[in-house]
Amino acid sequence: PREREGCSPLPSSFLRRLTPSRKRERYSSLPEAHTMADYVAQLGLSEEQKGMLQDFKNELKIPENVPFDGVADDLTLFRFISAKKWVMKDALKQYRAYREWRVSEELDKIQEWAKQHQSDIALIESLFPISQHGWDKGGRPLIYENIGVIPAARFAKLVKSEPFHKWHVWWMENLMRTMREQTKKLGKPVYKVTCIVDMQGSSFESRHFVPFFKIMSTCDEQNYPEIVQNVYCVNSPWIFPALYSLVKNFIDPNTREKIQVHSSGYEGKLLEQVDAKVLNKKYGGENPEELPTVKGIKVNEVGSEDLMSKSVAARDAFVHTVKCDDKHGGKFLWVVEVQSLDITLKVEWKGHKDKKTTLVQHTEKVDKSAGDFLAKAPGVLTLTMDNTYSYLTSKDVRYAVTYQSHAVLKTNAIIEARAAKAASKAAKRKKKNAKKNIVETSKSDPTS
C-alpha cells in the first residue's frame, strides 16, 4: 500500500484480530448521526480528488448510499484509490480483485468459520500475543504486539498456513468493524491504527515466523490497504536489522517510512501519539493493565463440565479408546464417575509397535477415578468400564479423556524455561540496581 496526505499506509502484520474472549466496545446500536458525505468531507481531499473518487465509484457501477460495511462505501473506495496514488487503472484492478477475493474466501461466513475452529484460534493466540487496548489521541485503535516472546520455531511446527491465513482474515474483518463503529461514535473517519511492537527477546530463532509475516503482509496489501498510522518497534535488539532484512521486501516502501525503530528512549515518541492514561505503564504511560504475553498453549484439563454420559447395562462393559498419532507420544488424562454406585475401571496402553498390551490402571468397584499416562510413542489408550459383576443394576457412567501431544508439552516446557530465565535476569538486574543506588547514596552522603 502507499501513502498520501490524508491516507494511511499498508496494514501491518503486527495487527491482531480481536478475539471473542476479549470484550470490545460496540457502537453499532448507536444512531448514525453522520452521513458518509460527512465522513468524506473530513478527509481533506482536493476538488480533483473528489472528482476522481466519484469517477472511481461510477466506473465500478456502485450506487449512492450503499451501506457502511467496509466493502463498497466511500471510505473503503477512498482507501483503495489513494493506496494506488490515485492511478485509476491500478486502483480498479486491485479493488476488483478484492471483491472477487471476498467471494472466494466466503467472508459472509467468516464468523461461522471462527465458531468451528476455536482450537486453531486458541493455539495461534496462545503463542502470538497481540491485543487492542484503548485508542490513540486520534481515536484510532491502539494495538500491542509482543513479538519478541513468540517461540517462533515451535510456532512454525504447530501452526499450519491455511488456518493461520483464515485466522488473520477473521481478525482483520473484526478490526475493520471496530474502526467503522469508532467512526460512527466519533463522527469522523477512523480507518487507521497505531501499533506498538515489542521486539525484546527476539533472536535468530525469530526467522521461523517470516512465512507467517508474509501471509499477513500479502493479504493486507491486497485487501486491507491504507490502515496503519504508525508502527513503533521498541526494545529492538542487536539482531533486529538482520531480521528486518528478511521481511522488508514484503512491505511497500511508503509503508516502511511509517515504521520507527527504537532500542530505548522511545517513551516520549509514544506519548506524542497516545495519552499517558491510555499508554501502558510498560512503555512509559500510566495504564497498569496487564498486557498478554506467551504463557503456553492452553491444554484441555478434565473438568466435570466436560464429562460425557454412558449407561452401562448389567453384565456388560463399555470400552472407550483414544488414539495418539504423534510419533513422540503425548499425555493422556482421564476421569470416570458413577453417581451413588460403582464400576470397575481398567486402563490399558498398546503402542503401534508393541506386541502386548500394558496395564496402566485397574481399579475395582469405584465411584470415582482419575489418572494420567505419558506415552512415548504412537498408540491407543483403552478405558474399559466394567459392570459385568452386577446382575441387575445398570450404571450411569460419566467420563472424559483428554490428550496432549508431545509437541504441545515440549512447547510449554520451552516457554516455562524461558520465563524462568527472564525472571532470573530481571531479579539480577534489580539486585544490581539496588547495590548501585546504595553506592551512589553513600558517595553523596558520607555520613550515611
Image (cartoon, helix red, strand yellow):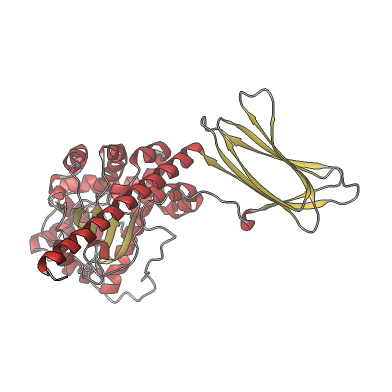
Q: Please say if 286 is above or below 416.
A: below
Q: Position of residue 369 (x, y in %)?
A: 70, 50
329 and 160: which is toward the camera: 329
In the picture provided, is 326 more to the left or to the right than 418?
A: right
In the picture provided, is 272 more to the left or to the right than 64?
A: left
Q: Please say if 30 is above or below 336.
A: below
**Numbered circles on residues, count:** 0
Q: Position of residue 346 (x, y in %)?
A: 73, 40
Q: Quadrant of residue 333?
A: top right
**Identity of the residue drawn at 15% across and 65% down:** 442
- Could you tell me if residue 242 is visible in this image? yes
133 and 184: which is toward the camera: 133
Q: Position of residue 45 (x, y in %)?
A: 12, 63
In the picture provided, is 216 more to the left or to the right than 243?
A: right
**Identity of the residue drawn at 66% across and 53% down:** 307
**Identity of the residue drawn at 27% across and 68% down:** 183
In the picture provided, is 22 more to the left or to the right than 396?
A: left
**Identity of the residue drawn at 36% across and 46% down:** 418
Quarter that holds the C terminus: bottom left
32 and 309: which is toward the camera: 309
Q: Please say if 36 is above or below 228.
A: below
Q: Residue furthest front?
A: 447
Q: Quadrant of residue 289?
A: bottom left
